[in-house]
Image (cartoon, rainbow, N blue to C red):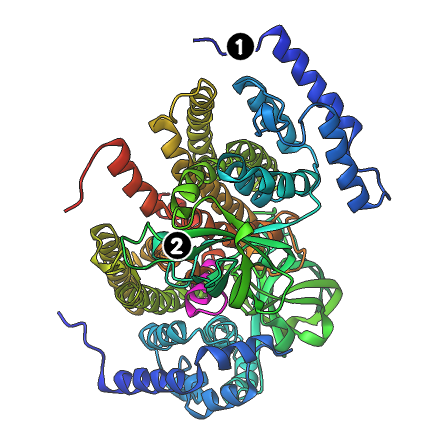
C-alpha cells in the first residue's frame, strides 16, 4: 500500500505549484479575467515550455506519457490558483479524446501543434435539451458523399472563442437518446457561428450554431464510447481542481476566524464555529480519498472505475456546496465581496458543479 | 382556533385586489411620478401606504388576518420600489423615542417617500457583535452639537440616501451596550464619503461610509445620550422577523416549479425527476409550516403579547428556505447557470445564479444565523454559555 507519488510527479507538482504562486495572485488573475481573451498567452506559452501541454500524450507521439494521476496533480494546483488558461478544454477534453482516437492520421497531424500550444481544441457535447446526458444528441450529421453535413446547436462550450478546432458530437442515426449513431467530428472553428460570453467564475464559454457545416469524413475522431471515456476523465480532472479550491476555502476560513474578533473573542473560540470548520475539513479529506480511489481505478482501468467516478463527482458536488457556502458564511459580510478571494473559489466550484453532471445526476448514475 | 377567512376578510381581499389592479404602473408612464402617486392613493385609502404604522400615526389598524392578506396580495403585485429604512426601521423609533419636534420634522417626509434613509449600524469591527461599535461622537463644550468620526460598513443604499440614522459611541468607559447614542446625520455634506462594495452577484447595493469630523446638532439626537442601544435593540428583532420573507418564498417556489417544468429531461421535464421533485416537496412542507409560524407570530403581536418563541425562529428558518429555493433554481438552470450576464439557454438561469450568490448574504445580515441561535438559546431556552 502506497499513496506516495513518484519523484517525477513530485517535480511536476512543485513546478505547477510554483507557477501558481508566482503568477496567480488575485489582482493578476482579475486582470486576466477582465481582458477580452480571458487568459494570458504568456502563461499559455509557459505551460507549453514546461511540458504540461504534452503531459497526457504518449512518448511515441512526442508527449510525456502521463496518466490521470499526473493530470490530477496539475488540476489540483490549478484549483488552488483559480487558473484560467484553457488547460481543461484543450488538454483534458480535446487532447484526451484525440489521444485515444483510432484516427491516426488526424492524431499525427494535430498533436505536435497541441503540444506547442498553437492548436487549441475544445469539446462541444451539450445541447439545450440534453442537460447532463451525453447520449441526448439532436445535432445531425448527414452523410453526403465523402462529407458529413452538420446541423444543430451546441451549448456552454468551454473556451470556444480561442479554440482553433472544436470536437462536436452529432448524430448520424438512431433516436434522440441512443448511444449508437453518435459520432465525434473535428471542425475548424472558423466554420462555426458562435455567441461568446463569460461564465460566473471568470471563464469563457460559447453557444455554437452549426448551419450546414460540411466536414470531410476523415475528420471523424470516434464514437460515443470515446466521448464517455473522455467525460469520465473530465470528471476526475474537475474533481481534482475542485479539491484544490476546497483546500484553499477551508484553510482560509480557519485562518480568518482566528483573526476576526467579535464578542471579545476570535470567532474561532466559539465551539459552533470550530465544529463547522471540522466538518469542512472532514468533507475535504473524504473528497481527497475518493479522488485518489477514482483516479487509481481509472489508471488501472478497473471495471469499477466508471462507477467510482460517479461517486466522486457526487461527493465533490455535495462537499463543495457545503465547504463553499460555509466559507462564505463564516467570513460574514467579507465573504460576500468581490474583493476577497473566497467568493471567487466559491464561484469556480459552482461552475464545476454544472460541468459534466451535477451532484444529483451522478448519484442517479451511481445508483443505477 | 380558526383559520378560515370571514366574509369581511373576503371583502377586504377584494378591496385590496381592486386597489392593486387600479394602481399598477401604466406602460409608458413616468415611473417616479407614478411611484409618488401610488403612495398618495394608498394613503387616501386610510394608511395603506404605511400598513404597519399604529393608527395614531396614520396606520390602517388592520387585524393580523388583514396584514396577512395584504402580504399575500402584494407579493405578486408590482408595487413601486420602497426601502424599509425610513418606513419600517426609523419610523417606529421616532414614534417611541423621538420628541414631538422630531416626529413633526421627519415623519411626514418618511411617509411621503420624499427622503431616503440608510442605516448606519455595522462597522468593520462590529458585525454580529454590533454593540462593540466605535464610531465616535463628541459633544461640544457648549452642548450644541456632536462631532462624529468613524466608519460604517454594509450600508445598504448609502449612495442614494439623504440621511443616515446612526449608532455612535459617546462613552466607552462602561459596558459596551451603554454609551451608544442614536443620531440622525445628513448624507450630502463634506466629511461623508461613500465607497461602493461590489458583492458576489456583481451588484452594488452596499457601501462603506467614512464619516470624518461631521458636526451633528443635538436636535438630531433621538432620546437620551447613551441610550441608543436600547432604542435600536427592540427594532433589531423587528427587522429580523421582517427578513423572513415567507410570502416571497411561497411565490418563489411556485416560480421554481414552473421553471423546472420548462427544463426538458428526456421525454419529460425536470419537475418529473424524482430527486428534484422531492427536494421541491421538502421545501413546500417547510413553507407550509413556517407560514403558520408567521401567522402565530402576527396573532401574538396583534394581541399585544410579547412576540413568542415562534417569532425568534422566523428569520432563521425563513432565510434558510430562501437559500434553498435559490440553490434549487441554480440546479434547475443546469449547465446554463454557469453563464454570466447573458441570456443563454433556459431563460431563468441568468437571474437564478445572481439570486443565489446575492442570497448568501441572507443568513449573514440582520444577525447571522449563528447569532440568531445564540439569542434563541439564551432568551427562549434560558441556556447559559460557559
Q: Residue at x 77, y 30 (%)?
A: B41
The 10 Å Cα crowd at callout 1, few under 14, some 14 to 19, many 20 or more, is few
In the displayed structure image, the side of residue B245 where residue A251 appears, left or right: left
Residue A338 image offset from top left, x and y in percent: 50, 66
Is residue A314 visible in the rendered image? The answer is no
Kindly identify which numbered label has been placed on residue A222: none
Q: Quadrant of residue B312?
A: top left
* Range drawn in magenta: A337-350
* Residue A346 part of the magenta-drawn span: yes
Q: Secondary structure at mark 2?
A: helix
Looking at the picture, tell me which residue is in the foreground, B220 or B305: B220
Verify CB contact (< 8 Å) between mark 2 and mark 1: no
Q: Quadrant of residue A233?
A: bottom left
Residue A183 seen in render: yes
Q: Which residue is mark 2?
A: A325
Q: Quadrant of the C terminus of chain A?
A: top left
Pick the front one: A207 or B37: B37
Q: Residue furthest right?
A: B28
Q: Which residue is mark 1?
A: B4
Q: Chain of mark 1?
A: B
- Depicted A38 relative to depicted B6: above or below: below
Say which of A237 and B170 sits in front. Answer: B170
Place of residue B73 in the rendered image (x, y in percent of width and height, measured from the top left): 64, 26
Mark whose residue sits in front, 2 or 1: 1
Residue B224 placement, left or right of B50: left
Q: Is B199 left, or right, of B293 in this rendering? A: right
Residue at mark 2: chain: A
Amino acid at each position: 500500500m502506497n499513496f506516495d507519488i513518484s519523484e517525477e510527479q513530485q517535480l511536476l507538482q512543485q513546478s505547477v505549484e510554483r507557477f501558481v504562486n508566482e503568477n496567480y495572485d488575485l489582482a493578476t488573475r482579475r486582470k486576466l479575467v477582465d481582458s477580452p481573451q480571458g487568459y494570458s498567452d504568456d502563461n499559455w506559452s509557459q505551460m507549453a515550455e514546461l511540458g504540461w501541454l504534452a503531459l497526457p500524450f504518449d512518448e511515441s507521439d512526442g508527449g510525456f506519457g502521463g496518466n490521470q494521476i499526473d493530470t490530477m496533480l496539475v488540476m489540483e494546483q490549478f484549483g488552488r490558483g483559480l487558473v484560467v488558461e484553457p488547460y481543461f478544454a484543450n488538454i483534458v477534453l480535446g487532447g484526451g479524446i484525440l489521444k485515444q482516437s483510432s484516427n491516426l492520421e488526424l492524431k499525427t497531424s494535430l498533436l505536435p501543434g497541441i503540444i506547442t500550444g498553437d492548436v487549441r481544441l475544445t469539446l462541444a457535447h451539450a445541447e439545450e435539451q440534453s442537460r447532463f446526458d451525453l447520449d441526448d444528441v439532436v445535432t445531425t450529421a448527414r452523410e453526403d458523399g465523402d462529407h458529413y453535413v452538420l446541423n444543430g446547436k451546441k451549448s456552454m462550450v468551454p473556451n470556444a472563442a480561442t479554440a482553433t478546432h472544436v470536437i462536436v458530437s452529432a448524430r448520424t442515426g438512431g433516436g434522440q437518446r441512443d448511444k449508437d449513431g453518435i459520432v465525434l467530428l473535428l471542425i475548424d472553428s472558423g466554420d462555426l457561428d458562435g455567441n461568446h460570453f463569460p461564465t460566473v467564475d471568470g471563464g469563457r464559454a460559447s453557444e455554437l450554431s452549426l448551419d450546414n457545416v460540411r466536414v470531410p469524413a476523415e475528420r471523424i475522431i470516434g464514437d460515443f464510447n470515446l466521448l464517455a471515456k473522455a467525460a469520465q476523465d473530465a470528471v476526475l480532472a474537475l474533481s481534482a481542481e475542485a479539491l484544490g479550491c476546497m483546500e484553499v476555502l477551508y484553510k482560509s476560513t480557519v485562518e480568518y476566524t482566528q483573526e476576526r474578533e467579535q464578542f471579545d473573542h476570535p470567532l474561532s473560540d466559539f465551539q459552533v464555529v470550530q465544529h463547522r470548520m471540522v466538518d469542512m475539513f472532514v468533507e475535504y479529506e473524504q473528497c481527497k480519498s475518493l479522488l485518489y480511489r477514482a483516479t487509481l481505478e481509472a489508471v488501472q482501468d478497473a471495471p469499477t472505475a466508471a462507477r467510482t467516478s460517479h461517486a466522486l463527482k457526487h461527493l465533490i458536488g455535495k462537499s463543495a456546496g457545503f465547504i463553499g457556502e460555509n466559507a462564505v458564511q463564516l467570513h460574514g459580510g467579507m465573504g460576500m465581496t468581490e474583493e476577497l478571494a473566497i467568493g471567487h473559489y466559491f464561484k469556480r466550484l459552482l461552475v464545476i458543479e454544472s460541468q459534466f453532471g451535477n451532484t444529483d445526476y451522478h448519484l442517479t448514475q451511481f445508483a443505477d | 382556533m380558526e383559520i378560515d377567512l370571514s366574509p369581511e376578510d373576503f371583502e377586504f381581499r377584494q378591496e385590496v385586489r381592486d386597489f392593486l389592479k387600479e394602481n399598477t404602473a401604466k406602460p409608458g408612464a413616468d415611473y417616479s411620478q407614478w411611484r409618488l402617486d401610488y403612495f398618495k392613493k394608498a394613503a387616501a385609502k386610510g394608511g395603506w401606504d404605511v400598513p404597519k404604522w399604529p393608527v395614531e400615526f396614520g396606520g390602517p389598524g388592520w387585524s393580523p388576518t388583514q396584514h396577512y392578506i395584504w402580504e399575500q396580495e402584494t407579493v405578486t403585485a408590482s408595487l413601486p420600489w420602497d426601502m424599509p429604512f425610513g418606513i419600517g426601521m426609523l419610523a417606529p423609533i421616532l414614534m417611541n423615542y423621538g420628541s414631538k419636534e422630531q416626529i413633526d420634522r421627519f415623519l411626514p417626509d418618511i411617509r411621503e417617500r420624499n427622503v431616503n434613509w440608510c442605516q448606519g449600524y455595522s462597522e468593520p469591527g462590529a458585525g454580529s457583535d454590533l454593540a462593540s461599535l466605535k464610531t465616535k461622537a463628541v459633544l461640544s463644550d457648549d452642548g450644541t452639537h456632536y462631532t462624529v468620526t468613524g466608519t460604517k460598513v454594509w450600508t445598504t443604499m448609502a449612495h442614494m440616501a439623504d440621511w443616515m440614522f446612526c449608532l455612535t459611541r459617546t462613552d466607552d468607559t462602561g459596558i459596551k451596550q451603554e454609551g451608544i447614542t442614536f443620531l440622525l446625520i445628513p448624507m450630502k455634506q463634506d466629511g461623508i464619503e461613500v465607497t461602493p462594495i461590489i458583492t458576489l452577484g456583481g451588484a452594488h447595493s452596499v457601501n462603506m461610509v467614512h464619516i470624518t469630523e461631521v458636526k451633528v446638532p443635538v436636535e438630531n439626537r433621538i432620546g437620551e445620550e447613551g441610550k441608543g442601544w436600547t432604542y435600536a435593540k427592540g427594532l433589531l428583532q423587528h427587522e429580523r422577523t421582517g427578513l423572513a420573507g415567507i410570502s416571497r418564498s411561497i411565490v418563489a417556489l411556485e416560480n421554481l416549479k414552473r421553471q423546472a417544468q420548462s427544463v426538458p429531461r428526456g421525454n419529460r421535464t425536470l419537475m418529473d425527476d424524482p430527486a428534484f421533485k422531492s427536494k421541491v416537496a421538502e421545501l413546500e412542507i417547510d413553507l407550509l409550516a413556517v407560514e403558520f409560524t408567521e401567522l402565530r407570530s402576527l396573532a401574538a403581536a396583534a394581541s399585544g403579547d410579547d412576540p413568542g418563541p415562534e417569532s425568534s425562529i422566523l428569520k432563521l428558518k425563513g432565510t434558510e428556505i430562501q437559500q434553498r429555493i435559490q440553490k434549487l433554481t441554480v440546479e434547475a438552470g443546469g449547465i446554463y447557470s454557469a453563464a454570466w450576464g447573458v441570456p443563454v439557454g433556459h431563460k431563468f438561469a441568468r437571474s437564478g445564479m445572481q439570486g443565489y450568490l446575492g442570497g448568501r448574504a441572507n443568513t449573514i445580515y440582520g444577525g447571522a444565523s449563528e447569532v440568531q441561535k445564540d439569542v434563541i438559546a439564551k432568551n427562549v431556552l434560558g441556556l447559559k454559555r460557559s
